[in-house]
Amino acid sequence: MSPAPRKDPVAVETEVREKIHLEILKRTGAYHANDHVLLPSGQHTSEYIEKTLVTTEPSFTEGLGAVIAKHFAPWPVDVVLSTGPGALILSHCVARAHPSRPVVVYGAKGLSGGKRRVTIPVEFQRLVRPASKVLLIEDLVSTGSTLTLLINLVEQLGAEVVGVGCLWRRTSVELTGKPVFSLVSRDFPTYDPEECPLCKKGVPLNEEFVRRRHARRPSSVHEPKAP
Ligand SMILES: [Zn+2]
């Protein structure tokens, strides 16, 4: 009998690491697996991630940030740049754990003439200088469009992107030749309702995430009106 084929140790390590990180994201309540979820698009899936919840547990975020920092430790980094509140929390944790002790700066996302735009505050411009080494951090990368804007912004300032670190990257995303390190690289399988294998098996459909969007409003308060 021939021995069982041995798996590539690097692939095994990646697989194990990914399982651990998925378990962490499950503990935060952000990642739902083995479910049958209705997506806002009307499609069905077995997995779902709620981006807002990803960085709510500080000790988990610190641990995940340290893994990203360790990966990029051989590269000198002057600046860690991100955009969006979740990515900013993670970027703080990455910068704190990186041996170069980089500074943390962030951009703001917006729309200009119907086009997406990323801006960095003028006070940060003296920190992102020509030849600065910049590490970009994202929480979830689904289309890569924000990262493309960030890369263009850094290059416009004459600085250099040394890499991109993220918690989760959809495997379908192609990024412009920069080294990318993601803790989880995974795409959700999505199905049209007519072709959904979970519907065929009679698994009850979880409409919670779509219903919440319609039925729930964010909590807010207003300043009282002047009398
Ligand atoms: Zn279904």
Image: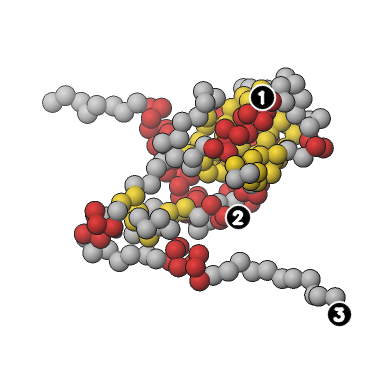
Q: Is residue 109 above or below residue 29?
A: above
Q: From the top left corner, tell me how far across and down residue 11 is, in percent.
A: 38, 30
- Mark toward the start of the polypeptide (2 vs 3): 2
Residue 155: image tag: 1
The answer to whether residue 33 is visible is no
Residue 227: image tag: 3
Measure the C-alpha gap from mark 2 to mark 1. 32 Å
- Mark toward the start of the polypeptide (3 vs 1): 1
Q: Secondary structure at mark 3?
A: loop
Q: Nearer the viewer, residue 10 or 126?
A: 126
Q: Crowding near pointer 1: few (<14 within 10 Å), some, many (20+)?
A: some
Please identify, in this view, whether the residue under mark 2 or under mark 1 is nearer the observer: 1
Q: Amino acid at mark 2?
A: Thr
Measure the C-alpha gap from mark 3 to mark 1. 51 Å
Q: Amino acid at mark 3?
A: Pro
Q: Amino acid at mark 1?
A: Glu
Q: Is residue 15 above or below residue 188?
A: above
- Mark toward the start of the polypeptide (2 vs 1): 2
Apparent side of residue 115 relative to residue 48 in the rendered image (left or right): right
Q: Residue at x 71, y 22 (%)?
A: 158
Q: Is residue 29 above or below residue 122?
A: below
Apparent side of residue 11 relative to residue 91 in the rendered image (left or right): left
Q: Residue at x 46, y 31 (%)?
A: 174
Check disc 2 and report the residue beneath it: 56
Measure the C-alpha gap from mark 2 to mark 3. 39 Å
